[in-house]
Image: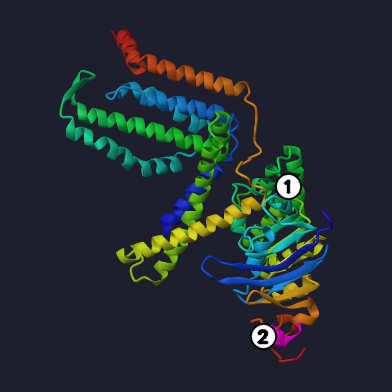
């Protein structure tokens, strides 16, 4: 029960964070979306053994979190929720890839290296997506997607799915609360109630979603979701995209940690 | 629109499960009237409101708003004239801030942002919650949520306000505050409620519904003091008209 209540709180906490005022929050949503998309695409374009070369990619989420005043706690907590999935994706590599490879002069299992690379890439991509949510909000992301000419039906689906997650969670919280008040062992749901409980939650959610939809229609909703926010990009937005674009491209073109390491090693010699 | 007359002509509605919720309701409500729709649970009050708003389509009969018949073509125009406040304000508040929620209607009408802001501020002022405009709706108290839900409707500048159980789940002070707000509106009001004291105070006319039919329609004081009629409809006399529970003094 507290888990569901926490989940509702967590979803809403991101809406709250998105309403803050900071350097990053004031940027045009499209600038943030483009930078995050570019970052993610370049990140996943790396070779499967890349690990050290990915280090410069830490700067982008760190900068976004620091300049956007996003607390690390909620961000890391959500990352931890996703982390098992990332680990599951990478875990088969050490089992099937028994070869070895050399990294920084050390011989290492290539399966484990791929696993580490997947965890780093996955974690950074998820963190940057979470930061986009926390600094832009779903309305801003929808606005940017429309600017990128994504069909309105897809954007609407995204918006309504996001809205209805909390409706589903609220209904689930009520059903589970009702169960736990009458169950002898409220810590877990008995297997025989899973089916009826899920059915009830689904039916209630559909009903509730219908009422929300009715309320939208009564206020003139005909398929277009207007947020009223339609700012034009300014100098800071262009600078943000150009600056991070250059950094990401440079990091991709040159293995910055290796390059810095060589310079430092040269200086020491 | 010819002056906000709301008319139901021989309305029938049957739910897909076969339940006949409305069984031939007809009435005519004039501009500025404040009408209470009362009846026991399952009498058909909420269904009637949904038929008036065009959320449900009657299986027979028609709804006419200001001489315009409600149908698919006129639905959007009529909905700009009618504003409905839902029984559960959480169904009506779905945006991330109160401002955005109240602005949803005007923005859907594609008004420019200056007009939207003016309408939102005016609606929030009318219900006295302008200071809450940047708050998240889920963080409001039940009374504040209800006020915000009313503001979402007022920002559409409707001629007719339809309220489904507006005082349910409100504490006495919030209830009184809401009643004062509603008293100040000059709109035509159609209010369904089990709060008969509120109906007694706010409505000049009352329709009593039972089994999807209007069993009585008349002056509030005549109807709400008729004990036999109230009991027939599954109701009781308003508390303010009942004998004093402490001393037994009759009224």
Cα separation between marks 2 and 1: 43 Å
**Residue displayed at 53% across by 29% down:** A32
Q: Which residue is mark 2?
A: B231
- Residue A187 visible? The answer is no
Residue A97 vertical placement versus B83 (above, below):
above
Which span is picked out in magenta? B225-231
Front tag of 2 and 1: 2
Task: Bin the neighbour count of mark 2 within 10 Å (Cα to Cα): few under 14, some 14-19, many 20 and up.
Answer: few
From what the image shows, is residue A9 above or below residue B206?
above
Q: Residue furthest front?
A: B60
Would you name the residue on which mark 1 appears?
A: B120
Q: Tell me what residue is drawn at x 45 percent, y 53 percent.
A: A6
Foreground residue, B14 or A244?
B14
Density class for disc 1 (Cα within 10 Å; few <14, some 14-19, many ≥20) is many
Instruction: Tell me the residue at 60%/23% (across/down).
Output: A236
Residue A97 point in image, percent of width and height: 18, 30
Residue B209 visible in image? yes
Q: Nearer the viewer, residue A151 or A262?
A: A151
Quadrant where the N terminus of chain A lies?
bottom left
Considering depth in this image, is A195 or A95 the residue closer to the camera?
Answer: A195
Residue at position x 80%, y 58% from top?
A: B67
Disc 1 chain ID? B
- Can residue A36 be found in the magenta stretch? no
């Amino acid at each position: 029960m507290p888990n569901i209540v926490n989940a509702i709180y967590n979803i809403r906490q991101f809406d709250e964070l998105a309403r803050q005022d900071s350097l990053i929050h004031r940027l045009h949503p499209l600038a943030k979306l483009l930078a995050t998309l570019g970052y993610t695409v370049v990140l996943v374009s790396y070779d499967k053994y890349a690990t050290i070369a990915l280090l410069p990619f830490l700067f982008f989420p760190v900068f976004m979190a620091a300049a956007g005043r996003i607390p690390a706690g909620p961000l890391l907590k959500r990352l931890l929720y996703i982390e098992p999935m990332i680990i599951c994706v990478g875990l088969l590599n050490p089992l099937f890839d028994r070869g070895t490879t050399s990294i920084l002069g050390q011989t290492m299992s290539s399966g484990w290296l791929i696993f580490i690379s997947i965890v780093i890439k996955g974690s950074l991509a998820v963190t940057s997506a979470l930061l986009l949510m926390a600094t832009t909000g779903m309305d801003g992301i929808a606005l940017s997607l429309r600017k990128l000419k994504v069909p309105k039906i897809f954007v609407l689906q995204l918006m309504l799915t996001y809205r209805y997650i909390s409706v589903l969670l609220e209904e689930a919280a009520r059903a589970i609360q009702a169960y736990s008040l009458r169950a002898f062992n409220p810590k877990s749901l008995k297997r025989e109630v899973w089916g009826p409980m899920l059915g009830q939650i689904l039916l209630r959610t559909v009903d509730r979603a219908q009422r929300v939809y009715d309320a939208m229609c009564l206020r003139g909703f005909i398929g277009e979701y207007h947020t009223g926010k339609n700012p034009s990009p300014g100098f800071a937005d262009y600078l943000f995209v150009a600056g991070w674009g250059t950094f990401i491209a440079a990091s991709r073109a040159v293995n910055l940690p290796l390059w810095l390491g060589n310079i430092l090693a040269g200086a020491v010699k | 629109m010819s002056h906000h007359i709301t008319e139901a002509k021989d309305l029938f509605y049957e739910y897909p499960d076969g339940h006949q919720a409305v069984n031939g309701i007809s009435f005519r409500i004039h501009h500025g009237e404040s009408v209470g729709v009362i009846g026991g649970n399952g009498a058909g009050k909420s269904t009637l409101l949904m038929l008036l708003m065009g959320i449900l389509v009657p299986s027979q009969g028609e709804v006419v708003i200001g001489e315009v018949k409600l149908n698919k073509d006129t639905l959007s125009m009529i909905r700009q004239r009618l504003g409905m406040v839902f029984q559960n304000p959480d169904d009506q508040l779905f945006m991330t801030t109160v401002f955005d929620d109240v602005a949803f209607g005007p923005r859907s009408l594609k008004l420019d942002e200056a007009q939207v802001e003016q309408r939102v501020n005016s609606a929030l002022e009318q219900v006295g919650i302008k200071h809450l405009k940047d708050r998240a709706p889920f963080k409001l108290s039940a009374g504040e949520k209800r006020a915000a839900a009313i503001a979402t409707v007022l920002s559409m500048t409707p001629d007719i306000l339809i309220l489904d159980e507006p005082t349910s789940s409100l504490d006495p002070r919030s209830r009184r505050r809401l009643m004062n707000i509603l008293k100040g509106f000059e709109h035509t009001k159609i209010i369904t409620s089990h709060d008969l004291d509120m109906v007694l105070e706010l409505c000049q006319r009352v329709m009593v519904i039972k089994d999807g039919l209007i069993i009585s329609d008349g002056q509030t004081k005549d109807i709400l003091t008729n004990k036999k009629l109230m009991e027939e409809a599954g109701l009781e006399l308003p508390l303010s008209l009942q004998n004093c529970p402490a001393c037994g003094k009759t009224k």
